[in-house]
Image (spheres, rainbow, N blue to C red):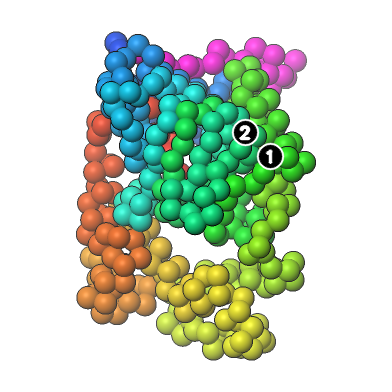
Amino acid sequence: MSPRRRLRANPAPPRIFRWTAANPRILWPLADTDPKALRDSARMTAIARSVLDTASLSPEEGFRTWRDEVSAIFDVRADPSGFGRARMEAAIMGDWLLGHSLLPGQAFDRTRSKIARDGLDVYLIQFYLGGATGDRDAASGEWTRPGDMYIVDASESLSTDATASEIVHLVLPRPMLSPLLHSPDGQGGRIIRGDAPLVALLRQHLVGLNREVGRMSQAEASLVLKPTLELAAAAINGAPDPMQKSSVEHALIGSIRRHVSDNLADPSLSAESIMGAFGISRTTLYRLFDCFGGIASYVRDERLKRCRDMLADPACSHLTAAEIGARWGFMHPESFTRAFTKAFGIGPRAVRQAAAERMRPGQGRDPAWSRWLTTVR
């Protein structure tokens, strides 16, 4: 029997980390091991899992614990004195995460300043099996119904209210899913009705994965990644979207975006250079990028994102904020600071300080799933 078959026939026991009053942290099994290295080395072993459960805590303690843990991605608000039991299970499937939660009612926020501070860039696909959520500020007042899909884009601000809910989660890094989407931007806050066939298939798939994940290895998780990605993209792409453009236009937008990404550091990148490269008129270019605020706004925002990434990267700590801005075309430090602050709600210095705080050991709680999030960029 080959070593691979022996591994599959006799997988290592699942690693489950439970939150209790005596064990207030959910940690990876090797707390001093780099999470990315541990994630990579665990591909052929059982799936790392974590469980956060506030059942043994008072409402106030339960709320504080939940608030601290979920702060890896959201700021939450609720009445501490009436906060009910919060339970969340997460399975870290290598480069993606699967989860199931039972949560009391609360408000979720993800502000521009939080986005700039943590640099998190993932899609969170949620199925509300029970309960509901809706955008607090949406004019439509639309809320999910049981079985509906709700999409969170961590690069976009969010403000929602949710009732007591049962939720299945799928967390995918943007580079995994965005190439498969017709419209990778602007998905945040979308509600896709659960009676659509592809949405129902994805929901059943994720519910089944949550049921079987305790018996799966990382090798098996890697086998289901591709069909999970393709089914998620099909469910999102197949849903009617009033902002959708034709397939030809989607392809052209994708080509232009790749061209922009490859040439962001080029000072000559402009609407005129793009028109020349693709043989299109100014009217066509502006129409294709109207949903981004125009082509000039799109280029500026992409350059600001590159600046944000460099400011948060410890490998770039020897560069000043002004030097980083100049690398991406912002030649005047004051103008760069104003543009950056307007885009992200905080200044370049605050982003760098937040990144330094994340690098310090022992900063706050460190559950397996939120520690995994810190490695996703």
Which residue sits at x=49%, y=84%? 270
Numbered circle sitting on residue 194: 1
Q: Quadrant of residue 168?
A: top right
Residue sticking out furthest to the right: 197
Q: Quadrant of residue 156?
A: bottom left
Which residue sits at x=46%, y=85%? 268
Amino acid of disc 2: Pro
Residue 3, visible in the rendered structure: no
Residue stretch rendered in magenta on the structure: 1-20
In the rendered image, residue 142, in percent from the top left (x then y), is placed at 55, 48
Residue marked by disc 2: 146
Q: As drawn, is 324 to the left or to the right of 37?
A: left
In the rendered image, residue 263, in percent from the top left (x then y), is placed at 50, 74
Q: Are marks 2 and 1 in contact (CB under 8 Å)?
A: yes
Label 2: few (<14), some (14–19) or many (≥20) C-alpha neighbours in 10 Å: some
Quadrant placement of the N terminus: top right
Q: As drawn, is 203 to the left or to the right of 297?
A: right
Q: First in sequence: mark 2 or mark 1? A: 2
Which residue sits at x=57%, y=74%? 289
Disc 1, SS: loop
- Is 154 one of the magenta-colored residues? no
In the picture shown, does residue 108 fall above or below 175?
above
In the rendered image, residue 364, in percent from the top left (x then y), is placed at 26, 31
In the picture shown, does residue 116 fall above or below 131?
below
Amino acid of disc 1: Gly
Residue 18, visible in the rendered structure: yes
Q: Nearer the viewer, residue 162 or 255?
A: 162
